[in-house]
Amino acid sequence: NAGVTQTPKFRVLKTGQSMTLLCAQDMNHEYMYWYRQDPGMGLRLIHYSVGEGTTAKGEVPDGYNVSRLKKQNFLLGLESAAPSQTSVYFCASSYFGPGSSYNEQFFGPGTRLTVL
Amino acid sequence: DQQVKQNSPSLSVQEGRISILNCDYTNSMFDYFLWYKKYPAEGPTFLISISSIKDKNEDGRFTVFLNKSAKHLSLHIVPSQPGDSAVYFCAIYDGKLTFGTGTRLQVTL
């Protein structure tokens, strides 16, 4: 099993450009998440999904959109990139989700995005 | 207002000694507390957790202690090994995970 994979690993964008980050998991997990990690800030939740066709906002959703058309994939889109979106983006998935006793989340290796 | 704080950004410990990583939280209504470990260029991986109804959980060299009255969580690693060198994040779970800012542990020979 590959676990959670992310594409691409690195990307450099100019301000105003758009891009989509792809996350895929092969563990048949219902729940998927997108986080960003910035220096001194820890990981912050951008959006999450509790199942195919559903998405919800996290702590820092502004400037991002997401889609979950297939259970195994969770896409994060930046329509008009800004320098403030320079960060490392992590995708995660879990078997259990909100409302369960706790959920262990499995993380992908991350995508390092720089917006100039 | 940050709910989870790791006040030590870095820690250096000699191989074989005990590493103690600390975490403070501000809200009492959490179900679980977790520790994640992160190596460079990799995603975080789950290390150990503790339920809010317990005060200690042990897994091999790793022990997590929960002091609810002080709203304090700690991770003890003993003995520390060079492979333990990584960034450690504490996280609280109340339906979603909220992470601390991380502590970089360096285990020296």
Image: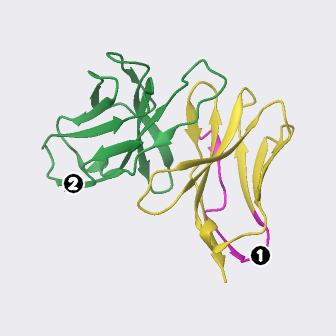
Chain letter for the yellow colouring in the rendering:
B
Q: Which mark is residue A11?
A: 2
**Is residue A12 visible to the viewer in this orientation of the structure?**
yes
Residue depicted at 78% across the width and 32% down the height: B52
* In this view, the mark in front (2 or 1): 1
User: Which range of residues does the magenta coloring cover?
Assistant: B1-19
SS at mark 1 in the image: loop
Crowding around mark 2 (Cα neighbors within 10 Å: few <14, some 14 to 19, many 20+) is some
Residue type for callout 1: Gly
Disc 2 marks a residue whose amino acid type is: Arg
Q: Name the colour assigned to chain A in the rendering.
A: green
At a point 20% along the width and 43% down the height, the residue shown is A81
Tell me: B44 left or right of B73. left
| Residue under pointer 1 | B16
Parent chain of label 1: B
Could you tell whether B77 is left or right of A44 in the image?
right
Quick check: is B6 in the magenta stretch? Answer: yes
* Local crowd size for mark 1, using a 10 Å CA cut-off: few (<14), some (14–19), many (≥20): some
Q: Residue furthest bottom?
A: B109
Say left or right for A26 vs B65: left
Can you say whether A8 is above or below B20 in the image?
above
Residue B1 in view in this figure: no
Verify CB contact (< 8 Å) between mark 2 and mark 1.
Answer: no
Q: Position of residue A52 (x, y in %)?
A: 34, 18
